[in-house]
Image: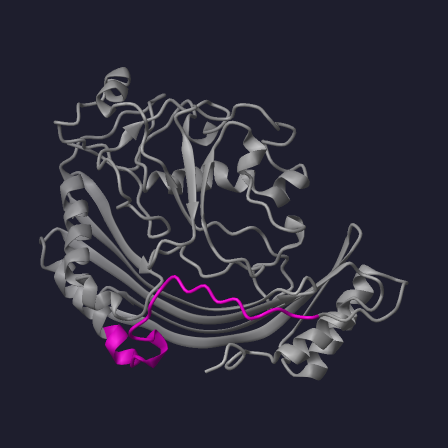
Amino acid sequence: MSQTENLLVAPDVLSRVLSRGRATGAEFSEVFVEDKRSTSASLDDGKVEQVSSGRDRGAGIRVIKGDTTGFAHTSDLSEKGLLAAAEAAAAAASQGGGGVNAVALGAVVRHPVNTVQKWPDEVAKRDKVALLQRVNIAARGVHKAIVQVSAGYGDSRKRILIANSDGVLAADEQVRTLMRISVVASGDGGMQTGFQSLGHTIGFEVFDENDVEELAITAAKQAVTKLSARPAPSGSLPVVIKHGSGGVLFHEACGHGLEADIISKGASVYKDKRGELVASPLVTLIDDGTMTAEWGAIGIDDEGHPSQRNVKRLRPMLAAAVKRRCASMRARSSISCRRRVPVWGCVSLKTGEQALRMRARSTNLPSPKCSLRRATTCSSETPTNLPGSPHPMALNLCHRSFGMMRSPSIRPTRRWR
């Protein structure tokens, strides 16, 4: 199969569409094409609540002239439909100019980071529902205190194609498979919950490699254990951040504020902070899109650039910003009118350079030989098994950087013995 076979739109058509986008004198034009198939199913109280599937297909075209960007979208992937969208985007970006700008596209860029063995859209829905039923039985069998089990399954298979007037031509096929489990236990101390999730950028084989019953049992044991746990203290507390799952906390507390489109609009708390120290020198952020099978793994980003591993120390803050061409104009979805925004890969914090024992002693935490009971928030969004020390690390993070996590009355949502 040649590089150009099996593309959503032929390269010669893309070239003409890009030229039409620049016909009014624009400096840059881009086509983003997407074809996505998805399935979801949910189970609650032993009953399958819904099973649904869908398909989203279309293209988004943006044209940039000076500081003005025109954006148009269409579900018609024929040459006629794409040319019409390009004209609309060009008209939105410019009211004058003219001329013909030929665009020569380069070779198709493919940068696969995952290998799919079982395409999820080729698996029968009954097999997906059977996973949920196995989860329900396993979780309820842990303890009589279990009163509710909820489980959700989801998968998607997305083909994307990006071309722009700089000659970029890139394609990727992105697969995601997800399972979420929530368990509620009831006892004398009230009700407690347990949660586990499994998400990877591979196919249905993820359930051959991971035991969903074991995942359900873990969630159920969490809920049951918390029934006898004493309440966590409130007040101003040190924050313990694990280098893997801690990436989730960083992403939500600080990551979005570091995105170039938010900063350029003046909507970030980090605006006008160029060159200032925004975190402890111990903190190193890793944004990695190449981690095979992890949730944030992608072959190319939404502008056609191959994914890579970005390691950033957060000393000059804006150097850590997620930047793209005219980042404020990027659109995450090609088939809606929403503008694109920067997208993170697998976000984690690099293992610290100081001994855990020293950091733990400074925050009155147990030594590494003790069983650390304070739970860290985990998510399928970021890997929790990165190479390095298996122990969490206490970081003295500055208030400005992690203000959301240093409020006067933090109350951990988890309990510990």
In which image quadrant can residue 406 be found?
Answer: top left
**Depth order, front residue of 416/245:** 245
| Residue at the image position 80 percent from the left and 61 percent from the top | 26
**How many marks are shown on the rendered structure?**
0
Span colored in magenta: 104-129
**Depth order, front residue of 265/219:** 265
**Quarter containing the N terminus:** bottom left
| Residue at the image position 25 percent from the left and 23 percent from the top | 355
Whether residue 46 is visible here, answered yes or no, is: no
Q: How is the image coloured?
A: one colour
| Residue at the image position 58 percent from the left and 52 percent from the top | 341
Q: Position of residue 62 (x, y in %)?
A: 70, 63
Whether residue 290 is visible here, answered yes or no, is: yes
Q: Position of residue 389 (x, y in %)?
A: 24, 35
Query: Is 105 one of the magenta-colored residues?
Result: yes
The answer to whether residue 140 is left or right of residue 118 is left
**Quarter containing the C terminus:** top left
Q: Position of residue 75 (x, y in %)?
A: 62, 77
Q: Is residue 292 above or below residue 18?
A: above
